[in-house]
Amino acid sequence: MTSSQHASYVRTEMLPESPPPLTESGIVKWVKENLFSGWINSLLTVVSLYVIYVCLSHIIPWVFQSVWNAGSLTECREIAQEAYGHTHGACWAVIKERWHQLLFGFYPQDLYWRPILAFLLMFVALAPILFDRVPRKLLFFTAIYPFLMIWLCWGGSIWGPVCAALGFVIGYFTLITLEKVAGSLIAIIGMFVVPVMWWLYLSGPVSEMLTSTLPIGLQAVGSKDIGGFMLSFIIGLSGIALSFPIGLLLALGRQSNLFIVKSICVGFIEFIRGVPLITLLFVASLLLGYFLPKEVTFDLIVRVIILVTLFAAAYMAEVIRGGLAALPRGQYEAADALGLDYWKSMRLIILPQALKISIPGIVSTFIGLFKDTVLVVFVGLQDPIGFSNLIRAATEWNGIYWELFVFIGACFFVCCFSMSRYSMYLERKLQTDHR
Amino acid sequence: MSTTYDASEPSFRLSMLIYDTRYRSLTIQVVAFILFMSGIAWLISNAYFNLQDLGKDFDFGFLGSRAGYDISPRLIEYSNDSTHFRATLIGLLNTLLVAFLGCILATIVGVIAGVLRLSNNWITARLMTIYVEAFRNIPVLLWILLFFAFFTESLPHPRTFKGEDPESTLFLGSIAFTRQDAWIPAPIMGTGSNIILIIFALSLFAIWFFGRWAKRRQEATGDILPTFWIKLAIFVLPTLAMYLVLGRPITLEYPEISRFSFDGGIRVKNAMLALWLALSLYTGAFIAEAVRAGILAVSSGQTEASFALGLRPNRTMSLVILPQALRVIIPPLISQYLNLTKNSSLAIAVGYMDLRATLGGITLNQTGRELECMLLMMLIYLIVSLIISGAMNVYNSSVKLKER
């Protein structure tokens, strides 16, 4: 040992660390590995760069060499010609002048605070559902939000929505009182029958009476004035809120052992999934009147919401059925072995797991539903695309396409993309297995 | 004694229908059935009385009467003297045409995008992510309108193709994309072209037989033939040889600029092109996600195991990864094909004459029979959907894992 320490060919101190070769570190290494690791990869890089160049070289001048202040398309072109020497730039003036129509339709301008308030309150109502750190007491607000939204958007007397909401309260108290007096079965039947009786016969006169004695209300706005993104939100939100419970029931029905219930559910789901939404919307606008008694007439928006809800519910049912089928058989057997009845085993054991599995599918069904709300333009409702047609029909904006499409597309993209990001967050949060 | 006997086997009581699990399911089903049937009966009776009040009847006889309108892309013989039934058929064929072409293009686009999204190339993967997210999060109707606006607003006018030194030229020297419509070369079938078509069909059969024979041979002897190249040769060579021997009987007629637009060639509606491209790219984004999920679902251990067995990368892909990935990919692929077929009804936005435009559009407006037209149209869409999903399910069961 000692001899080796003094041998001249043995190094006594460590060499300083030398940096790695230039091609094996930092950005050069990254580029080499990620962009030029082989001839296929290099080719892909070159092609991608070319595609990006072509896109950006068209889009950037269009977006930035644009006109923001003009009264018409011709004026836009004149200004662009003076400023940039060409007329290829965008004419954002149309958005600046007509954004309120794209967002609110023909809603009276001095009442815009109502839909905006409803939109902001939507986040308050959604917060306790979306994030579990929000206080649970807010769920009470979530329950009254639908009625509040309808009242804010359509206006009119406050007693109409209040009486409609009272039906649910009445149903709840009927259930509680009858359960003590007459047993659960009669209570459940009563829970459905009594509120329906209330809505059919009593709520109308009661709300009229209250309106005449205590006239609290907002200025009424007709359905024909509701349009643009506001309409998309109303239809999409109602469809999402209503289609989930219906889809859940349909999925349970389809998975049940009861033959007749199962057949009805399968028939309904397959029928709805087999036809395009647009035919169902035509059913809403053309045929629903045939199948209902003459005295019953709905607003077109309500009819469309009903059909959109049924459409989304069938897809929802299939997504949830996938989750139910993916659960191991042992979970069902374990729930039975614990002595739980059907609804308890579903509520406590099966559905929490099945719904967790089906979150991505459920959210993409929601996204699909929200995107599909633009189809209502074909039955005469004025959604953003309907308004883009209307704006183009005006003489001053005749021939303007891209700016409107970009604006509408961007709005939809923001909504749908944030929904899909939320679903990824939820999946991560609910992940219980260790990976 | 008799009392204990009675207690052990109680007689039937009415309350048992609800509280005894043996009878309860029956009760629930009977109640559900009665409610369902009475609901249906209520709807039908409403429809009956409403029709009676309007003085209408429920009759499909209008399908046999003269339609009196023109349909422009038509795959089979049709004139405005044809019946409404014939018009419906034309519409159905147009729907199927765009759906079929769309499914093919969407599959190609989707598979390429899905695979590229997983590639090592950072920039290509990001580009594909942008494509997928952009198309998945924006309504398909907007894409259709966007493509249609591009075709009708941004493409050159036919008159710019005119003159000695025209502003616009034919794409690849053979296709005219204009803002009116597109013109593509039309094949002219000369004498003897039937023979070439027959030879081509025979060579397809030969490829199929060769594939089966090569597989059996491989299973018996273990020898692997270069099947791809042999199949390619069978696909190309006989037809090409016959084509040259017969003196090129099939020629192409190119579109020629005439006074107002183009003559010759086949005129393809811009509406159809826009619908086809928009639907394909939109559905392709969803298929890309399905393909990506399918490939990711095959664990990396499978790749490593097949490398350990000494398989080359391309055989690993075709024998190990793809068969397992296909099982995951095919069910969502089926629903995407169905979605594309149903979304083709958005042809209403661009005026392409599909089933909705003929039966659910002009026929409905001419005859005023909303009930019959809409029900028939929904029935046809339902049948088409069921056929597609049935056919794809047969294919799915042929590739899925065989379990005992």
Image (tube, helix red, strand yellow):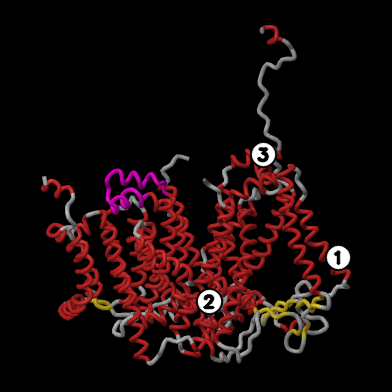
Above or below for A47 versus B369: above
The answer to whether marks 1 and 2 sit on the same chain is no
Q: Can residue A171 be seen in this view?
A: yes
Q: Nearer the viewer, residue A344 or B190?
A: B190
Q: Is the magenta stretch mostly helix, strand or loop?
A: helix
Secondary structure beneath label 2: helix
Q: Which mark is residue B307?
A: 3
Chain where mark 2 sits: A
Looking at the image, residue B305 sits to the left or right of residue A219; the answer is right
Residue marked by disc 2: A93
Residue A341, given in percent of the width and then of the height, sits at 27, 51
Above or below for B209 versus A103: above
Find residue B144 and report its image quarter: bottom right
Instruction: Judge whether residue A329 is colored magenta.
Output: yes
Q: Nearer the viewer, mark 1 or mark 3?
A: 1
Looking at the image, residue A187 sits to the left or right of residue A260; the answer is left
Q: Are the two marked residues, 2 and 3, in contact with CB atoms closer than 8 angstroms?
A: no
Stretch of the chain drawn in magenta: A327-352
Q: Residue at position x 45%, y 62% from top?
A: A365
Residue B57, given in percent of the width and then of the height, sits at 41, 89
Image quadrant where one finds the N terminus of chain B = top left
